[in-house]
Amino acid sequence: MILRTLIALAFSGLALPAIAQTCEETQDKHAVKIAGTDSQGRLNTNVAPEIYGNHNFMQELDNGWVFVLSAARWGWQIAVFDDETDVTAGTPPLRGPNPREIYGWHFRDADNTGPNTGEVNAPQHMRAFVLSPRAAGTPPGPDDGIGWLKIEDFGLSDLEPGEQARMSYLKFNACLSWPKTEADKASESLDFSEVDQEIFGSCGLDLAKYRLEAAICTSAEACTRLDSNLASVTYNPLSLSPTTLAFSATSMPLNSHARAAGRTHYLLKASKGTEPSGVLFDLIMTSTTPSSSIGTSFNVNYDSSLFTPGSPISAPTDFYGAYNPDSLEKNYRTR
């Protein structure tokens, strides 16, 4: 049964889950592993999730999707909700036992007197399912993804002969993977697009003299290390008032685009040739018209509620902007 489903997925144009069940992001695909709960009560992707009884399992992804195991008569059913749409609904086959259904009787023989040795046509430990907003039965599209769930351990109830067994305990690993959009790829790229170049040029940056550079922090662990470095090296606060922070213009190091604490943090440095110019573009403020001046230091307006001395500055609002290399004025516009 599961082989037939995998063949159907293959013919649908979707990549099949690797036999080793890896869950790694690539240049072209997102990959999110469903996390279990460790002994401290924290979500941990190194811990296999568990569920039992009539409980439901739910976990929200960063993109807003919600992975769900909903309690059913004989076990649980897999769903992934995008708002109110279950994007797994198109998983084949559309009739008969489906990989999204994790039922106890799938693992028992026809009369429920022993394990299923092949006489019951039902999916087993490895479940693959489609991730698509399209209606069931429609052709696959380029934005469709795939998910897998591997049953690591389970417990069954209602094992009397003639009954249909119910799964009452489940330990599993699961991963969701879907294609990255062009916008996703652009946001992660180390290169500035033609649109970015045009925006900075229109803000006054002489692109004949200065080149745009950026480095990106793509993981929470890397962002934490990067922000710690920025806190100790990058911002060298000379003074602090309720709305203004003074920085040393020469203390700002390499460019970064870091995501931390759910907020986007940008720093940009324009370089002249191979020599750092000290001309910096800084996007950690919430004001669209910050006053600024450059000398040995410069001041920027910011939301004081977002800054604690000794910790990174972050802000929920993103801006585009650039220095004019002649007047050293900072120009901003909302993104």
Image (cartoon, helix red, strand yellow):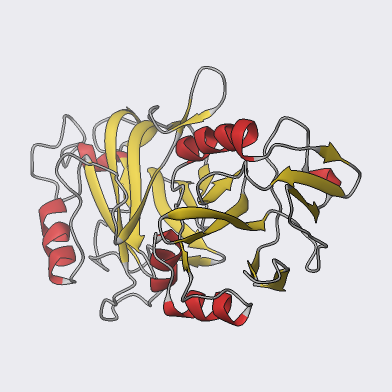
To which quarter of the image does residue 10 belong? bottom left
182 sits left or right of 333 in the view: left
Residue at x 62%, y 44% (from the top left corner) = 250
210 sits left or right of 46 in the view: right
41 sits left or right of 141 in the view: right
Q: Is residue 222 visible?
A: yes
Q: Which one is in front, 248 or 44?
A: 248
Residue 144, percent from left and from top: 32, 69
Seen from this angle, which residue lies furthest right?
Answer: 242
Residue at x 21%, y 65% (from the top left corner) = 14
Residue at x 40%, y 50% (from the top left corner) = 77
Q: Which one is in front, 235 or 56?
A: 235
Q: Is residue 12 above or below residue 101?
A: below
Q: Is residue 302 above or below residue 226?
A: below
Q: Which one is in front, 170 or 244?
A: 244
Residue 7, percent from left and from top: 11, 62
Seen from this angle, which residue lies furthest left?
Answer: 118
Marker count (numbered): 0
